[in-house]
Amino acid sequence: MNLAIIGAQWGDEGKGKIVDMLAPHFDVVTRYQGGHNAGHTVIIRQGGADQKFVLHLIPSGITHAAKTCVIGNGVVVDPRALIAEMAELRGKGVEVTPRNLKVSNRAHLILPYHVALDRAIEAGRGGNAVGTTMRGIGPAYEDKMARRGLMVGELTDPARLSERLRANTRQANRLLAMLGGEPIDEDRLVEEGSQWCQLLAPHIEDTTYYLNQAMRDGQRILIEGAQATMLDIDHGTYPFVTSSSSSVGGACTGTGLPPSAVGLVIGVIKAYTTRVGGGPFPTELNDETGEAIRARGQEFGASTGRPRRTGWFDAVIARYSVMINGLGALALTKLDVLDELDEIRVCTGYRINGQVTDRVPFDAESLSAAEPVCETLPGWKSPTRGIRRFNDLPSRAQDYLRRLSELSGAPFAFISTGPERSETIVDHDVLRACGLSLEE
Ligand code: IMP
């Protein structure tokens, strides 16, 4: 059975660790959307010691030599970022070859003018800035939808690439001039483009055919989401979202796999909530507790280093994610971050203009006005770091988890009690009930 791993909140839920843990049970790991705005922390074994490494674009399976990693057609690829990440991995002794890293010829390119446009557009938004990662993600998807984007496959035809790079750079420079952004040097870009062709062409392939054939050959595919449900262009807190379909719908459009191939969907969710960038966040804590969670959870962006906004677990969001993605189970992360709190709150509904609702409103204005309706649970005030069996958790932590699962409407297949792979409670009964067996 194939498996999709998807963020159930606003991102940074710890998908990297869960994908990293599960990758050994799969043959192929594929990303389907987003770009190098993501930051997935994985562990690389080098010189006999485990080292943390943050992947931005390449699927987290790359550290497992036998796997094939696929950057699907729904991803936007910055060639500079991809080349740098490949080089960094090789420098750490990780094998990166055309056999184990394949990039879809239909994925769209992020070019330097997209980065310049991202900056200029964000500056123009003033106080309503989305708080993007400034990686050019939005402008690259805009070009794709406006049917003027350049695809990765064009890197296999340097002459055609040069021609199209020149035409697109001229058009983008006109736009940049209007927005007060820095123009891009067309000649330098064309020269750089020919280097990209040399370095990346061996990895480029029609990954739609590759993935479908792999499936017919009985290989198991792990589909790795980036960002998260509440940042989805359709289902998230628009306009404070990313520009791709980060919830499960994107898994099909972004890989060329049919819906029947997706199999089980597991949502990764933190024991509390964080968000980076602008936009509504009903359970946000702008106080000492929020600060304590940020410090203990090391809540600083993996891609940009920005401090993350922190708040209580929001069961309205959790239920919505379970519904949108058809989550069969959840992977709860960072339980240990809450170990020292006296009491812990959980949001069960929103009060908006005096009315209580258990639904996510469609607009950012209503969600910004939402006052969380909360339950308060007692803290467990004892360490949970590294605990590997549910029954070994303090009873109040068990109660907290049961309540979260009940409110969210999905069981926990994994509970992460620390950053290391081994610091995880795995519920094999839940996985088996979902049709997935990880036991050898
Ligand atoms: P963009 O994806 O760079 O356009 O940023 C759009 C919004 O998504 C901003 O609020 C970002 O902070 C947020 N975002 C993008 N990537 C991530 C991520 O990997 N984790 C959390 N938030 C993200």
Image: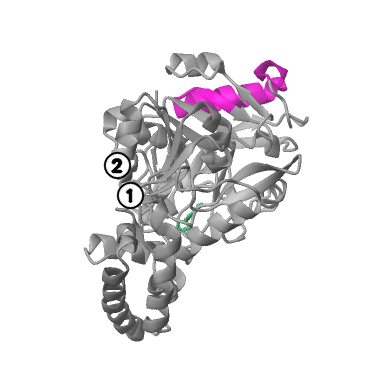
The answer to whether the residues at label 1 and label 2 have Cβ atoms under 8 Å apart is yes
Amino acid tagged 1:
Asn
Count of numbered marks: 2
Relative side of 84 to 132, left or right = right
Indicate yes or no: mark 2 CB to ligand 1 under 8 Å: no
Q: Is residue 82 visible?
A: yes
Residue 243: give x, y in percent of width and height.
36, 56
What is the quadrant of residue 309 in the picture?
A: bottom right
Residue 220 percent across, percent down from the top left? 42, 27
Q: Residue 127 appears at what percent x and percent y?
A: 46, 71
- Please tell me how crowded label 2 is: few (under 14), some (14-19), or many (20+) other residues with Cα within 10 Å: some
Report the quarter where the N terminus lies: top left
Q: How far apart are marks 1 and 2 (CA)?
A: 8 Å
Which residue position holds label 2?
208
| Residue beneath disc 1 | 73
Where, by quadrant of the figure, is residue 128 drawn? bottom left
390 in magenta: yes
**Which residue is at a point 39% across and 36% down the rendered structure image?**
320
Marks 1, 2: nearer the viewer: 2
